[in-house]
């Protein structure tokens, strides 16, 4: 069973947290920060340094085992040691610190600074506003809450906006504005950056920072990448140096939907510098009403809403169902904040399914690791927004939380089976940062957030050492071809292809000497018979001199096509044109058309001196090459193509068209080839980590007897399953200048970019911006956010115009996110390799322990 808020009852008093909160009334001075401080001070953890921005993704409690009589050795995972696969283990209650106390409540801000809120249920709503009363049945299923002014309010500081950047012209801006309005109902204002001459959109009204970030998330969900910008004028109370900003003088004009204007923007990047909140507000009153009944009640205190049947009819905010309760109160702006008051475990259920999608990454151990990381992050950062009356936001600034409907059975199982477990370092909950796709390596926290954290060190996102690929190996006991001559390397593969298609008289042991020997007439007749069998043709008499190129070409054409195809389709001039070998005159007239067609199509090889040597007996290698190439080109070999899934137990696994894994057993003596460079080489074993393009053949017994493997484009890192394991982005110098904004002021027009330093993971940690008026540096984690790139694990290529000036910068990179802590898709990859959730967490977080909280 999971811990949830007990369902409210008219016969029960409200929870103690509610009693404390409702024992005060709003007056001239806001008391909400004090109330919330009393409620959570015992568990509040210091706010993390650095803004957390992560891209979104995507049974009963386990039995506690008693310590064994003999000690077991666990392999430690450190920064310097290679990743060995430790024995599976579960957390032992006797060996870990147990934090006593009940499951904590979380307060998640579903909305901030809204003018009205709709709360509903398909059953009947209950509400509580006064600690002297029990929950009151409202006899309605829906209410609308608004904040009314009881005294004049000072101006609010709604200075943040959501902006879509980088549109090349006004027409594109207008088109994008229409699309956004259709998708989100938000009106957009068109703006022009006069420095870069690029267009943008300010979507919706000005908001508080938190409200703007929530609006940004909704806009990105609709498929429109956006940023949050601060439109406030420079303030004398906060120095430019303190906020690390410097803006040039511009003319500010009124924003209208029709006239583009130049605007100064300040990117939101430093959460440690915030405009001071006003210390007092005029008294506000919450009005709850219903379309059928009108005004239901009013309250100057926060209002808590619940359902009288939480299990079947949970409470809803804006039609989305949530576990727990919904609290609404007037904030310091005089607007509404809507908070989901929920137990920690139920909160984590609504996080895991959105941070690591069970549909895209269905590995239970990875989901358990994600559940523990999410639970730990929540505990560590509880109270982060205490002054605003809640713990965390439902966005990537905290953790993505979307409530009840986003939960999935597999992720819920992961939460249930890790109930109460958190990651600790030195007995304290860690700041369990995680990143979507690390690009093969994670980074030291000090290089991204400018703070040394002992458990957040850079790691390779894979099992290191020779044993890293052992579980993915396909092996063969077949004797390898003995070839050393370059021209024979590819012939070994062609012989294998023909062998699995019932071509007799092919040697089981292929060598240079066998391939270079003259072919015998009996061998050619046998192979032509196999060709005729595949093409369903009748093999006519084969001449004795079939071992010579002209006669072989005519016999092969007959076995393949059944008639003189070349003689019908080529006239004499065509034949002379295509038969351009220097000894063409030695080709008999009866065979000239067949030879010309096979040479034209690249099937019949010509010697390096441009001769055919039509009077010489062919080698086995030349005959095999011609037959195999012709059959391959016409699709007559029964080869299948596919993309491999990670192999297991010498079993080839394919992803079928229906999205299900299809296992294929491999013959012990399979012909096994692996592409190395531009050639395919026979090998005794090959690793299939997933994503490899393959060609294979299945024999009559259902076993794979031929397998040709190309390396996976995404490599072998554990995060290779992510579509963002590699990416490319191209920006003009003007776009770079616009995106860098206040980070590179005073440089003028951007002339060049230069990587000055890289971190332990090779991420860029110092980027020099060279302009025609000066030089600036962008450092640390702000490089990614400032440039608007997915990651800062990238290299830069440049395209030049006809005058030799940089026309654009091409960023080729890997990963998505800040790159610190646990790699979410990498956790999935490690789970596919057999890692347990404990091993995954200890691989990414150095020196941690797992601790049972409750």
Image (cartoon, rainbow, N blue to C red):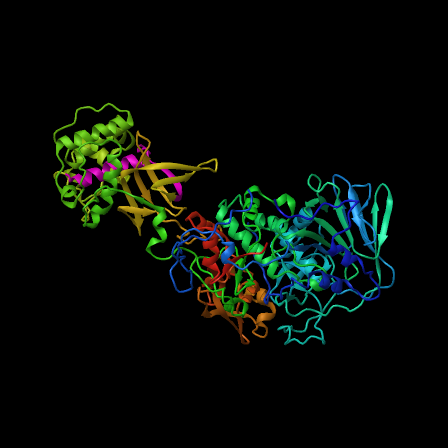
- The image quadrant that residue 673 belongs to is top left
Is residue 83 visible in the rendered image? The answer is yes
Q: Is residue 102 shown above or below 240?
A: above
Is residue 671 or residue 108 the one in the foreground? 108
191 and 508: which one is in front?
Answer: 508
* Residue 565 lies in the magenta-colored region: no
Q: Please, is residue 237 above or below residue 797 in the view? A: below
Q: Quadrant of residue 162?
A: bottom right
Quadrant location of the N terminus? Answer: top right
Residue 275 appears left or right of 752: right
Identify the image quadrant of residue 495.
Answer: top left
User: Residue 389: x percent and y percent?
Assistant: 72, 60
Query: At which x and y percent is residue 183?
Result: 67, 47
Q: Is residue 642 magenta?
A: yes
In this rendered view, identify the residue nearer to me: 783 or 652: 652
Locate residue 354, reporting x and y percent: 58, 49
Does the rendering let one see residue 576? no
In which quadrant is the C terminus drawn? bottom right
Name, please, the residue furthest toward the front: 69
Q: Is residue 236 above or below residue 707?
A: below
Q: Which residues fall within the magenta stretch?
A: 618-646
């Amino acid at each position: 069973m999971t811990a949830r808020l007990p369902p409210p009852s008219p016969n029960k008093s409200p929870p103690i947290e509610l009693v404390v909160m409702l024992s005060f009334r709003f007056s001239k001075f806001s008391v909400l920060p004090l109330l919330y401080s009393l409620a959570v001070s015992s568990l509040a953890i210091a706010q993390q340094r650095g803004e957390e921005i992560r891209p979104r993704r995507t049974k009963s409690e386990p039995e506690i085992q008693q310590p064994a009589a003999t000690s077991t050795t666990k392999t430690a995972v450190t920064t310097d040691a290679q990743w060995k696969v430790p024995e599976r283990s579960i957390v032992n209650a006797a060996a870990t610190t147990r934090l006593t106390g009940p499951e904590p409540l979380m307060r998640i801000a579903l909305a901030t600074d809204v003018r009205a809120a709709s709360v509903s249920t398909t059953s009947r709503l209950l509400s509580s506003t006064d600690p002297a009363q029990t929950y009151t049945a409202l006899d309605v299923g829906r209410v609308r809450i608004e904040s009314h002014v009881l005294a004049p309010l000072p101006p609010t500081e709604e200075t943040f906006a959501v902006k879509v950047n980088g549109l090349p012209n006004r027409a594109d801006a207008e088109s994008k504005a229409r699309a956004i309005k259709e998708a989100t109902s938000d009106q957009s204002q068109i703006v022009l950056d006069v420095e870069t001459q690029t267009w943008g959109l300010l979507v919706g009204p000005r908001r508080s920072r938190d409200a703007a970030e929530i609006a940004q998330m909704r806009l990105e969900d609709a498929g429109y990448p956006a940023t949050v910008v601060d439109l406030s004028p420079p303030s004398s109370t906060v120095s430019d140096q303190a906020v690390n900003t410097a803006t040039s003088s511009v003319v500010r004009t009124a924003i209208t939907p029709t006239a583009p204007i130049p605007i100064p923007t300040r990117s939101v990047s430093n959460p440690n510098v915030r405009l001071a909140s006003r210390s007092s507000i005029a008294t506000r009153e919450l009005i709850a009403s219903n379309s059928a009944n009108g005004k239901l009640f009013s309250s100057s205190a926060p209002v808590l809403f619940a359902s009288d049947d939480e299990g079947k009819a949970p409470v809803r905010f804006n039609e989305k169902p949530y576990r727990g309760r919904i609290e609404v109160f007037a904030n310091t702006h005089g607007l509404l904040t809507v908070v989901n008051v929920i137990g920690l475990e139920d909160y984590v259920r609504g996080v895991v399914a959105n941070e690591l999608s069970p549909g895209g990454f269905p590995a239970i151990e990875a989901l358990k690791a994600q559940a523990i990381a999410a639970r730990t992050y929540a505990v560590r950062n509880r109270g982060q927004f205490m002054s605003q009356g809640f713990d965390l936001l439902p966005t990537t600034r905290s953790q993505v939380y979307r409530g009840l409907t986003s939960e999935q059975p597999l992720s819920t199982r992961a939460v249930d089976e890790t109930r109460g477990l958190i990651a600790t370092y030195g007995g304290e909950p860690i700041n369990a940062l995680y990143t979507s796709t690390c690009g093969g390596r994670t980074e030291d926290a000090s290089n991204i957030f400018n703070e040394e954290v002992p458990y957040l060190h850079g790691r390779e996102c894979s099992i290191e050492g020779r044993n890293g690929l052992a579980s993915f190996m396909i092996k063969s006991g077949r004797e390898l071809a003995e070839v050393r001559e370059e021209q024979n390397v590819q012939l070994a593969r062609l012989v294998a292809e023909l062998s699995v298609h019932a071509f007799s008289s092919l040697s089981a042991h292929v060598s240079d000497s066998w391939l270079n020997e003259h072919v015998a007439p009996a061998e050619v007749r046998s192979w032509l018979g196999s060709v005729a069998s595949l093409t369903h043709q009748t093999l006519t008499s084969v001449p004795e001199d079939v071992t010579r190129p002209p006669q072989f070409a005519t016999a092969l054409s007959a076995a393949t096509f059944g008639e003189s195809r070349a003689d019908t389709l080529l006239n004499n001039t065509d034949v002379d044109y295509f038969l351009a070998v220097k000894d063409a005159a030695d080709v008999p007239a009866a065979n000239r058309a067949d030879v010309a067609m096979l040479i034209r199509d690249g099937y019949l090889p010509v010697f390096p001196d441009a001769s055919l040597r039509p009077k010489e007996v062919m080698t086995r290698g030349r005959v095999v090459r011609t037959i195999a190439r012709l059959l391959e080109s016409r699709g007559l070999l029964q080869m299948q193509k596919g993309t491999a899934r990670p192999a297991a137990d010498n079993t080839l696994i394919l992803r079928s068209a229906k999205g299900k894994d299809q296992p294929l057993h491999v013959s012990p003596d399979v012909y096994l080839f692996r592409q190395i460079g531009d050639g395919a080489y026979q090998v005794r074993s090959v690793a299939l980590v997933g994503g490899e393009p393959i060609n294979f053949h299945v024999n009559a017994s259902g076993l794979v007897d031929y397998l040709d493997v190309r390396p996976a484009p995404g490599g072998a890192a554990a995060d290779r399953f992510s579509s963002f394991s590699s990416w490319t982005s191209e920006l003009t110098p003007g776009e770079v200048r616009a995106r860098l904004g206040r980070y590179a002021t005073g440089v003028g027009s951007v002339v060049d970019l230069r990587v000055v330093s890289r971190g332990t993971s090779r991420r860029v940690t110092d980027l020099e911006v060279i302009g025609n008026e000066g030089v600036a540096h962008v450092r640390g984690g702000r490089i990614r956010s400032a440039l608007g790139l997915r990651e800062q694990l990238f290299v830069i290529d440049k395209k030049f115009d006809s005058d030799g000036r940089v026309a654009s910068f091409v960023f080729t990179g890997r990963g998505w996110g800040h790159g610190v802590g646990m790699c979410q898709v990498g956790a999935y990859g490690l789970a596919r390799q057999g890692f347990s959730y404990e091993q995954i967490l200890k691989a990414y977080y150095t020196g941690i322990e797992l601790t049972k909280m409750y």
